[in-house]
């Protein structure tokens, strides 16, 4: 930790923990201490740590062909794109390396599509307050949280913000300078805020009526996290464009942009690229990961475990007055506290449970989707002990 402090840029508030090994829902630190992991790389390790099928797929590809560039074709990438297209609304895929990069691609695709279709002047993207889309300058400009902007202005122009779940505000913002509406069906960093009721359906209708693209950022809430392969499936609507990343390659870095055939016309050769995008090793890992994540029996088990966790958390609300609200879906939950959440994170860690706090007071639970009921019970026990002692 001291060595890191001497050489690594100070961009993260890290926990004082050096992790050396992981398996399933557990990680071990350098002293051999075991932790139940309900952070899971912030929704990256959806199949837990060191999943053998992902390790096998990546290792086999690693000794066969690692990288050739997108000047050539490779089979794992094509297989992955075919699967993503088969499993989603999308007709075409662009591969990149992270969530922020997928967002950059989405911003460029929407702007260029609108430019080709309507001519110049239609470049604005309406985004949501409390959203999070990443740290590169375009993704940051689309992020509706001013605290992340400080010191980086001027940001990229052309982003307008409205409150999430407020249809009237959105309708008001949609003039003929707007090319797209961008939202997370369930806001993650914003505090685990799901889209409410028929809001998404109404947004879809508005966008369709006005010829405006609808973009879903499913970087965090997608890929099985909510008990459906994509969170928007809970709402019965599809977007024109969707960004994926985090869990896509089972822990290795990969992002993807999916779009309908019509929208994908916005990109032509030379308009967008990524050196590492869709590389064979990452794509092989993603193929292994997606095979499991898209299995209907697996997704049904996620929904069952998620309902169980959600119900138990709701009981906590009557037991612990410090809890203001419980929000979530599937295995993505937020416990909003009336007080600062950091002491809870620290006390849980001391008891062998890793959880994260977002927005200062929302304890976020993002377990492995293969988490066992006994692990959920252990997490709930530690959380209960912690809430009792920290706020007594
Ligand atoms: N979009 C959402 C919804 C996210 O939660 C995140 C990261 O937390 C991002 C985009 C950015 O992803 P990355 O950190 O891979 O750039």
Image (cartoon, helix red, strand yellow):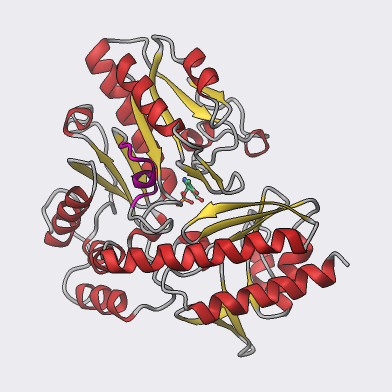
Q: Residue at x 34, y 23 (%)?
A: 205
Nearest the eye: 287 or 229:
229
x then y, percent, for residue 250: 36, 67
Left or right of 141 on screen, residue 31: right
Is any part of residue 201 visible from this angle?
yes
- The stretch in magenta equals 230-238
Rendered residue at 50%/35% (across/down) = 137
Question: Residue 112: where, in percent of width, then height?
Answer: 29, 23
Q: Is residue 65 magenta?
A: no
Residue 2 visible here: no
Residue 35 to residue 217: above or below: below
Q: Quadrant of residue 143?
A: top right
| Residue 147 picture quarter | top right
- What quarter of the picture does the C terminus occupy? bottom right
Lateral position of residue 169 relative to residue 341, left or right:
left
In the rendered image, residue 286, in percent from the top left (x then y), is placed at 28, 63
């Amino acid at each position: 930790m001291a060595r890191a402090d001497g050489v690594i840029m100070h961009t993260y508030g890290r926990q004082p923990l050096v992790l050396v090994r992981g398996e399933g829902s557990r990680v071990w630190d350098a002293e051999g201490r075991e932790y139940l992991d309900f952070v899971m790389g912030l929704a990256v390790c959806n199949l837990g740590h060191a999943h053998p099928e992902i390790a096998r797929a990546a290792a086999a590809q690693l000794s066969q062909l690692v990288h050739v560039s997108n000047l050539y074709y490779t089979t794992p990438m094509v297989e992955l794109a075919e699967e993503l297209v088969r499993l989603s609304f999308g007709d075409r895929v662009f591969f990149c390396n992270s969530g922020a990069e997928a967002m950059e691609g989405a911003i460029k695709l929407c702007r260029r599509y609108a430019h080709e279709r309507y001519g110049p002047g239609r470049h604005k993207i309406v985004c949501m307050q409390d959203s999070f889309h990443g740290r590169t300058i375009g993704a940051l400009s689309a992020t509706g949280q001013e605290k992340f902007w400080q010191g980086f202005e001027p940001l990229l122009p052309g982003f307008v913000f409205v409150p999430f779940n407020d249809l009237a505000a959105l309708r008001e913002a949609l003039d003929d300078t707007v090319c797209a509406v961008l939202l997370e069906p369930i806001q993650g960093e914003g505090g685990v805020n799901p889209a409410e009721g028929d809001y998404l359906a109404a947004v879809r209708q508005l966008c369709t009526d006005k010829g405006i693209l609808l973009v879903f950022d499913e970087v965090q809430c997608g890929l099985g996290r909510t008990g459906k392969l994509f969170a928007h499936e809970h709402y019965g609507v599809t977007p024109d464009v969707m960004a994926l990343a985090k869990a896509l390659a089972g822990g290795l870095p990969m992002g993807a942009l999916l779009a309908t055939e019509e929208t994908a016309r916005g990109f032509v050769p030379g308009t967008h690229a990524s050196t590492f995008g869709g590389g064979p090793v990452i794509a092989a890992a993603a193929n292994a990961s997606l095979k499991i994540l898209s299995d209907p029996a697996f997704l049904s088990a996620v929904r069952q475990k998620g309902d169980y966790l959600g119900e138990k958390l709701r009981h906590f609300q009557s037991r612990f007055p410090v809890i203001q609200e419980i929000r979530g879906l599937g295995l993505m939950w937020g416990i909003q506290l009336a007080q600062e959440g950091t002491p809870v994170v620290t006390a849980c860690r001391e008891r062998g449970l890793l959880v994260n706090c977002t927005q200062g007071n929302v304890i976020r639970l993002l377990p492995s989707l293969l988490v066992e009921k006994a692990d959920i019970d252990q997490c709930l026990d530690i959380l209960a002990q912690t809430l009792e002692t920290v706020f007594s």
